Image (tube, rainbow, N blue to C red):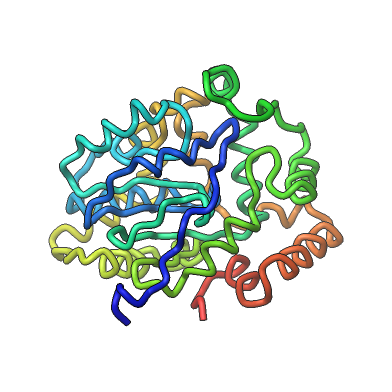
Amino acid sequence: MSNQSIEWPVKTRELHSHHFDSTIWNDFAFRDDDVVISTYAKSGTTWVQQIVSQLIFAGTEDLEVAEMSPWMDLRVPPKEVKLPAVEAQRHRRFVKTHLPVDALVFSPKAKYIYIGRDGRDVVWSLYNHHANANQLWYQALNDTPGRVGPPIDKPHDSVRQYFLEWLEKDGYPFWPYWENAQSWWAIRDLPNVLFLHFADLKKDMAGEIRRIADFLGIAVEEKTWPAILRHCSFDYMKANATKSVPLGGAFWDAGAEVFIHKGQNGRWREILTEADCQAYEARALHELGPDCARWFAEGGPTV
């Protein structure tokens, strides 16, 4: 199938919140080799940014990945600052988004990598992110010009209550989960889209990095392969978190290491009740359908 005969996604709306300003994509000038890394959130975004940086820069150490690979639709800093900085980059660009497809300008020029994860694991990581955020984080999101909608408040003391509210209010206090999952799943077969799953990265990181390299058209020299694997390991990223985390971790009093927390799945199993899990699984089946719900829960092939 030629690119001319493909029905490419079209942006149909804008998303604004304490975090989002989706209008930045309207002014983003795509290049032929751009890479866009996408997740709902807390699904391995930083990990895949690290992987892509290592492939592009052939295993180079001490890359300032957070600075090189900004979250484009985060409204701070504003697009007037962010767009010129990204336009000035001369290396192969790799940026991230947390938008659903219909709020994103989708380009046939770019390569899109989407990472999925079970929503329960997402919430456990999201809670750690939120509960450890400091006053600077709240000020940036709530008090800077351009916020649309209510501010984001401090989280519950109970992670189970946090999960139940996230489930009941579809992503509260961040953004909807199901529409993000549905919108990306619907375009998984496009030639410039690659689906990854957090569980598969955990199970076979080397194999998944090879898949990413093939998708991006990057020939990996075997002499750089050991360095790439080392620099993409959880232990390395945890020890060098200030390079990967926005503002070097300034939004968390415990530092960048709290952002790259445990990298584990299934921590919810000891806290959620059987009824809680059944409610989540029923909602996932209703919202996503059986194939999509299974993939987000388990990973593996998308067909």
Q: Position of residue 251 (x, y in %)?
A: 50, 24
Relative to 120, 188 lies left or right: left
Vertical arrangement, residue 78 with respect to residue 34, above or below: above
Q: Position of residue 268 (x, y in %)?
A: 71, 53
Q: Position of residue 3 (x, y in %)?
A: 30, 73
User: Residue at coordinates 52% horizontally, 41% vertically from top-left?
Assistant: 261
Please state which of residues 219 and 29 is positioned toward the viewer in this rendering: 29
Q: Quadrant of residue 195?
A: bottom left
Relative to 302, 112 lies left or right: left
Please state which of residues 302 and 190 is positioned toward the viewer in this rendering: 190
Asked if residue 264 shows in the view, the reply is: yes
User: Residue at coordinates 18% horizontally, 49% vertically from top-left?
Assistant: 57
Q: Position of residue 52 (x, y in %)?
A: 30, 53
User: Residue at coordinates 56% horizontally, 53% vertically from top-left?
Assistant: 264
Asked if residue 253 shows in the view, the reply is: no
Vertical arrangement, residue 7 with respect to residue 89, above or below: below
Vertical arrangement, residue 2 with respect to residue 169, above or below: below
Please state which of residues 293 and 257 is positioned toward the viewer in this rendering: 293
For this orientation, the residue located farthest to the right is: 275
Vertical arrangement, residue 61 with respect to residue 278, above or below: above
Relative to 163, 118 lies left or right: left
Q: How many marks?
A: 0
User: Residue at coordinates 52% horizontally, 19% vertically from top-left?
Assistant: 145
Image quarter where the N terminus lies is bottom left
Relative to 217, 298 lies left or right: right
